[in-house]
Image (tube, rainbow, N blue to C red):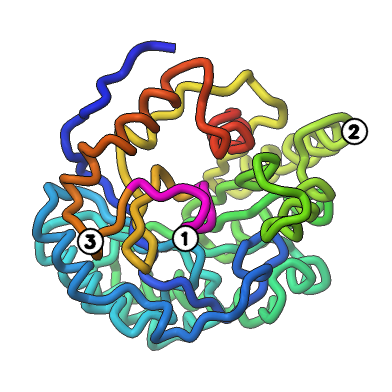
Amino acid sequence: MSVEPLDPPLRAHLQLEVTSACNLGCTMCLVRYRPPVNKLAGAMRPELFHRLVADLPLEQLTLQGLGEPLLSPYLPEMIEAAVRRGIRVGFNSNATLLHRRRAQELVASGVDWLHVSLDGATAQVYEAIRDGARFGTVVANLAGLVAAKREANSTTPWIRVVFVAMRDNVAELPALVRLLGDIGVDELRVQNLSHSFDDTDPAGGYDGIRAFTARQALWTGEDQSRSRTAFAAARTAARDTGLRLRLPHVSDEGGGNCTWPWDAAYVTSAGIVQPCCMVMGDDRVSLGDLTETGFAQIWYGERYREFRRRLDSTDPPDVCRGCSLYRHTF
């Protein structure tokens, strides 16, 4: 690995978990395996958001974490504050709450991108993954967003669908490409499960999501062959429809060279600073608490410096070893 500076300049990209509350219980998300969070109690406080925006030289702001951003009562003012300062801003949504009026408001807000999670091409597969959602509603809301953008003759938001590939849904990928081509979205991004959770206690608080990942991940053996077949068919469908398509690697390329702790930072709704969005759970890694100190003190603090030092070595932090971004399979 190349040696990176342990004290990089404050970065221009910040990802904020604007809420830890969610209205779904998705099978691959930590939210499903934890007690429910009230949407007001789980929301990032506006004063923390505005302090970060005022104090940092931001150029890009991602307003998402484990929760559903549309549940945050403060989301519109956060978008407005970013747009007013010339900061590129966007977020990911499960789109269950993205009714037509809200879609029109988001197009008018100047938000730069909006990513919609859609992990199947049929109701049976999708609804088994996104517990609490209705396939027909989400597809209709996605089509309404595309229509609202066209009606406003707007170039934004960039509309990307995100598909988390697993054993239960990867075969539906080609059909989803054709569906999205008909709707007219801009892009489909396919990604693997984000983490193996192998660093956690098998009998501890992460046992549920750890076991789920072991059953569903497409990282080894026969699953790689099935993935390649589905990916090849999806590429053909994307060429036919003109849909932009991004596919993940299906095998481990050795890992290493992750630059997240140098390029950006992730802040939970409670104000805990973490090295990236892939960690899941603010009890796994904390580099500092913004309710106790400022961001610059945390960014240049000893915990951040030690995390960077280990990540840039052959002995990375345990939490990074099972990360699909670190392993180049995301």
User: Which mark sits nearer the N-terminus, 1 or 3?
Assistant: 1
User: Badge 2: few (under 14), some or many (20 or more) residues near its Cα, within 10 Å?
Assistant: few
Numbered circle sitting on residue 157: none
Residue 262 lies, with reference to residue 96, above or below; the image says above
Identify the residue shown where x is 31% and y is 18%.
Answer: 4
**Callout 1, which amino acid?**
His
Q: Disc 1 and disc 2: Cα gap in Å? A: 30 Å
- Quadrant for the C terminus, please: top right
Which residue, given by chain and number where applicable, does mark 2 sit on?
Answer: 222
Judge depth for marks 1 and 2 and give the one in front. Answer: 2
- Dividing the picture into quadrants, the one containing residue 3 is top left
- Where residue 261 sits: x, y (%)? 35, 36
Query: Of 44 and 91, which appears nearest the observer?
Result: 44
Identify the residue shown where x is 30% and y is 57%.
Answer: 289
**Callout 2, which amino acid?**
Glu
**Callout 3, which amino acid?**
Glu
- Give the structural element (helix, strand or loop) at label 3: loop
Q: Is the magenta stretch mostly helix, strand or loop?
A: loop
- Quadrant for the N terminus, please: top left
- Give the structural element (helix, strand or loop) at label 1: strand
Any part of residue 155 in sight: no
Which residue, given by chain and number where applicable, does mark 1 sit on?
Answer: 115
Any part of residue 239 in sight: yes
Q: In this view, does 184 lie to the left or right of 69?
A: right
Judge depth for marks 3 and 2 and give the one in front. Answer: 3
Q: Report the magenta residues as a range.
A: 278-287
- Give the structural element (helix, strand or loop) at label 2: helix
Numbered circle sitting on residue 292: 3
